[in-house]
Image (tube, coloured by chain):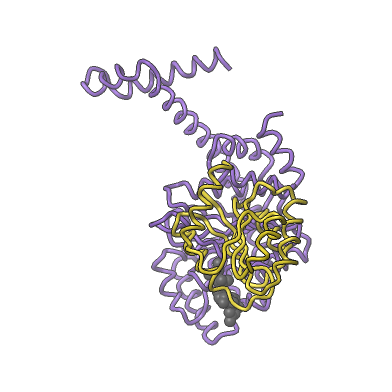
Chain colours: A yellow, B purple
């Protein structure tokens, strides 16, 4: 059973996109922990730790990813959770993809990504791990 | 030290990551997960296990959050398990109870885990029993289990709890729903949440009316507590009722009986697991086809064959390990 935490760090005003992803993953047979809006990096990593998820899927629309994502990845490493797959979606300019991947994000999914691509990507990567 | 022993000692040191990983093993019901529960069981038995059930939307998660904050203020360490249904179509689930628990779960004295019901018969209550045992051994003083209380497995989970609270809210026609679901019988404490809304007194009276219908003879008459979970109101009284119920269980000897029952359960599970495993081995082995045919043709009785298998297995065990 693949377990995923769908999390929304920062101050985004709505979570429609995150909910669409959560439902798509559920419909693909995954267990999705959803924690709602306005999560701090500390809350997100702590939830991922307690829930022992295979995948952390972050959704950020606000443009705050250059500060939020490195902080989240720092907490992931200091908690020795490097085996967790971290994905990023929302509104991430093409120019930022490389720096996000350097920070430790496995894959950035831009707006308009087919949810089935995310499902397939997770399936491939998580079965590699287990 | 093998992997299970290693995890046991880290869990006893209350290492969060070890608790989380242990819960994953327990949920998967792997051999390691089973061994872990057996190893931790003797170290458990101190926590107060509290079930919280009721229809979706009555405020159970919000109540768990404010109850946890109040228990923390009083110095108790709190473990939380929240069970949500798996989709019967995909097998997946959305586990959203954490949304309402954000205030309480960041504290190091709190550990919260979301569980999906995963649909298999008896599997949920088994996983929950393992999860409760693990949290209990890890030193959590109170373990709160939230379920929607609809299916058979959820009722089984509530039987795991020392004290079960049934949560209702005014204006949802819940009084009627409660009887239908047979939920009245499993509650030792009734909570009318959303008492800030009209109709809370009416709901409380309706519950009292139904309870008096055949419970006067009981030693424990369920109290009815009004709360506003969203603002933390009524929590002192609720914790008072929980403590009184725990005291009642202890005085009446029921608490010891529950532990006895759980011990029997652990032994039974171990036996079933052992038989399961050995049977799979016999089926994969040489003489199986011949045995199967003898039973199919009526040459030998199935029970006689089974007994012979069990005997040879126990002999094998004495010689071997
Ligand atoms: N008015 C009012 N609303 C509440 C109270 N407690 C919870 N709620 C709201 O009820 C809704 C459902 O709460 P939740 O805890 O998720 O219910 P659950 O499905 O039983 O776990 C949420 O919108 C809460 O904010 C309360 O005491 N008063
Ligand atoms: Mg809930």
The percent position of residue B157, horizontal first and vertical second, equals 51, 53
Residue farthest front in this picture: A95
Residue farthest bottom in this picture: B198
Residue at 54%, 38% (x, y): give it. Answer: B30
Front residue of this view, candidates B273 and A6 = A6
Quadrant for ligand 1 reads bottom right
Asked if B173 appears above or below A49 in the picture, the reply is: below
- The answer to whether residue B197 of the structure is visible from this angle is yes
Front residue of this view, candidates A128 and B195 = A128
Front residue of this view, candidates B122 and A119 = A119
A86 left or right, relative to A73? left
The percent position of residue B259, horizontal first and vertical second, equals 60, 44
The percent position of residue B151, horizontal first and vertical second, equals 42, 58
Q: Quadrant of the N terminus of chain B?
A: top right
Rendered image quadrant of residue B88: bottom left
Q: Quadrant of the C terminus of chain B?
A: top right
Front residue of this view, candidates B196 and B240 = B196
The percent position of residue B62, horizontal first and vertical second, equals 61, 71
């Amino acid at each position: 059973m693949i377990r995923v935490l769908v999390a929304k760090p920062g101050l985004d005003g709505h979570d429609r996109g995150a909910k669409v992803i959560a439902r798509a993953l559920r419909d693909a047979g995954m267990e999705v922990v959803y924690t709602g809006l306005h999560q701090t990096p500390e809350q997100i990593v702590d939830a991922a730790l307690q829930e022992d998820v295979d995948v952390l899927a972050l959704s950020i629309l606000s443009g705050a990813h250059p500060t939020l994502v490195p902080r989240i990845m720092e907490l992931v490493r200091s908690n020795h959770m490097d085996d967790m797959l971290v994905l990023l979606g929302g509104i991430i300019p093409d120019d930022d993809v490389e720096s996000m991947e350097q920070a430790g994000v496995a894959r950035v999914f831009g707006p308009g990504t087919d949810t089935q691509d995310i499902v397939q990507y997770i399936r491939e990567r998580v079965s590699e791990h287990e | 030290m093998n992997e299970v022993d290693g995890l046991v000692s880290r869990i006893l040191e209350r290492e969060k990551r070890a608790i989380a990983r242990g819960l994953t093993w327990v949920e998967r019901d792997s051999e390691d997960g089973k061994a872990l529960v057996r190893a931790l069981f003797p170290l458990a038995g101190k926590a107060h296990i509290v079930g919280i059930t009721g229809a979706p939307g009555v405020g159970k998660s919000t109540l768990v959050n404010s109850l946890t904050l109040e228990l923390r203020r009083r110095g108790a360490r709190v473990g939380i398990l929240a069970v949500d249904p798996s989709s019967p179509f995909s097998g997946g689930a959305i586990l959203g109870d954490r949304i309402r628990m954000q205030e309480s779960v960041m504290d190091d004295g709190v550990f919260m885990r979301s569980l999906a019901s995963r649909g298999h018969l008896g599997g949920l209550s088994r996983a929950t029993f393992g999860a409760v045992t693990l949290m209990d051994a890890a030193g959590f003083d109170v373990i709160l289990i939230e379920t929607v209380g609809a299916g058979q497995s959820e009722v089984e989970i509530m039987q795991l709890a020392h004290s079960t609270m049934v949560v209702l809210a005014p204006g949802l026609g819940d009084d009627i729903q409660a009887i239908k679901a047979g939920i009245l019988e499993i509650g030792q404490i009734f909570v009318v949440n959303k008492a800030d809304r009209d109709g809370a007194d009416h709901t409380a009276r309706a519950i009292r009316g139904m309870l008096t219908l055949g419970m006067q003879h009981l030693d424990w008459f369920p109290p009815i507590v009004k709360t506003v979970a969203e603002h933390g109101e009524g929590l002192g009284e609720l914790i008072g009722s929980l403590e009184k119920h725990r005291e009642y269980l202890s005085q009446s000897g029921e608490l010891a009986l529950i532990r006895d029952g759980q011990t029997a359960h652990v032994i039974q599970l171990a036996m079933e697991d052992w038989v399961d495993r050995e049977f799979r081995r016999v089926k994969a082995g040489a003489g199986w086809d011949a045995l199967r045919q003898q039973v199919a043709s009526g040459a030998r009785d199935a029970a006689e064959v089974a007994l012979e298998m069990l005997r040879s297995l126990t002999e094998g065990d004495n010689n071997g390990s």
